[in-house]
C-alpha cells in the first residue's frame, strides 16, 4: 500500500489545479466579452478564427438576455482554441494607439485655447508645427471664437477651430 503512495502523489502533481482552470476560463470569457463589445472594424484587426467570428455574430443576433449569457459561455469555450497571446498583444497595441490619439487631441485642445487667448503670436508658432493649416480660415475662426468667448456665448466657432486643427494635424 505504501508503494502506491508515491505514484498517486505524482499523479496529483501533474493534474491541473481546478481553481486555476476556473480563473483561466473566467479570463477567456472576459476577453470574449471585450471582443464582443468592439466594433467590426476593430475586431477585423484581431487574429480571430472564423469559428469565433461566427460565435460573436451569433451573439449579436440573440435577443434574450439569458440566451446571451449562455452563448457568452460558449464564446469563452471557443476562446480556448484561439491564439490568446496574439489577441492580447493586438489589443495592447490598439490601446496604445488610442492613448496616443487622446494625448494628441489634448495637445490640440491646448493649441486651441492658446490660439484663442494669444492670437497672432500663437498662430506663428502653430504654423511652424503644422504648416499644412489653412491660414486664412484659421485666423477667421480664431477671431469668431474670441468674439463668442468675450460675449459669453456658447458658439460653435471653438468647435470649428478644433476641427480645423485636427485636419491640420491629420487626425
Image: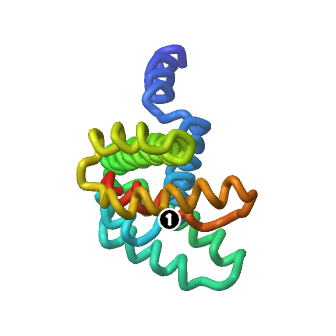
Asked whether residue 21 appears in the rendered view, the answer is: no
The residue closer to the viewer here, 31 or 42, is 42
Res 59 → quadrant: bottom right
Dot 1 falls on a residue whose secondary structure is helix
Q: Is residue 111 left or right of residue 83?
A: right
The residue closer to the viewer here, 123 or 59, is 123
Q: Is residue 37 left or right of residue 80?
A: right
The residue closer to the viewer here, 123 or 56, is 123
Label 1: few (<14), some or many (≥20) within 10 Å?
A: some
Instruction: Please report the residue visible at 72 percent of the width from the left and 63 percent of the height from the top.
Output: 153
Query: Which quadrant would the N terminus be assigned to in this image?
Result: top right
User: Which residue is label 1 attached to?
Assistant: 160
Res 126 → quadrant: top left
Instruction: Please report the residue visible at 57 percent of the width from the left and 42 percent of the height from the top.
Output: 117
x and y, in percent, of residue 87 in the image: 36, 50
x and y, in percent, of residue 49 in the image: 30, 65
Instruction: Please report the residue visible at 42 percent of the width from the left and 39 percent of the height from the top.
Output: 122
Q: How many marks?
A: 1
Query: Which quadrant would the C terminus be assigned to in this image?
Result: bottom left
Asked whether residue 123 appears in the rendered view, the answer is: yes
x and y, in percent, of residue 63 in the image: 65, 85
Amino acid at each position: 500500500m505504501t508503494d502506491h503512495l508515491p505514484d498517486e502523489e505524482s499523479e496529483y502533481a501533474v493534474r491541473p489545479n481546478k481553481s486555476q482552470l476556473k480563473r483561466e476560463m473566467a479570463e477567456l470569457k472576459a476577453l470574449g466579452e471585450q471582443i464582443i463589445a468592439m466594433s467590426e472594424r476593430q475586431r477585423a484587426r484581431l487574429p480571430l478564427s472564423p469559428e469565433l467570428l461566427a460565435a460573436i455574430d451569433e451573439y449579436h443576433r440573440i435577443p434574450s438576455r439569458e440566451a446571451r449569457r449562455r452563448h457568452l459561455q460558449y464564446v469563452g469555450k471557443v476562446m480556448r482554441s484561439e491564439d490568446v497571446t496574439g489577441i492580447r498583444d493586438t489589443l495592447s497595441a490598439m490601446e496604445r494607439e488610442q492613448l496616443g490619439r487622446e494625448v494628441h487631441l489634448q495637445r490640440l485642445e491646448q493649441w486651441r485655447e492658446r490660439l484663442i487667448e494669444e492670437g497672432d503670436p500663437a498662430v506663428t508658432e502653430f504654423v511652424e508645427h503644422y504648416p499644412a493649416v489653412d491660414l486664412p480660415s484659421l485666423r477667421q475662426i480664431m477671431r469668431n471664437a474670441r468674439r463668442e468667448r468675450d460675449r459669453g456665448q456658447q458658439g460653435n466657432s471653438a468647435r470649428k477651430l478644433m476641427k480645423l486643427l485636427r485636419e491640420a494635424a491629420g487626425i
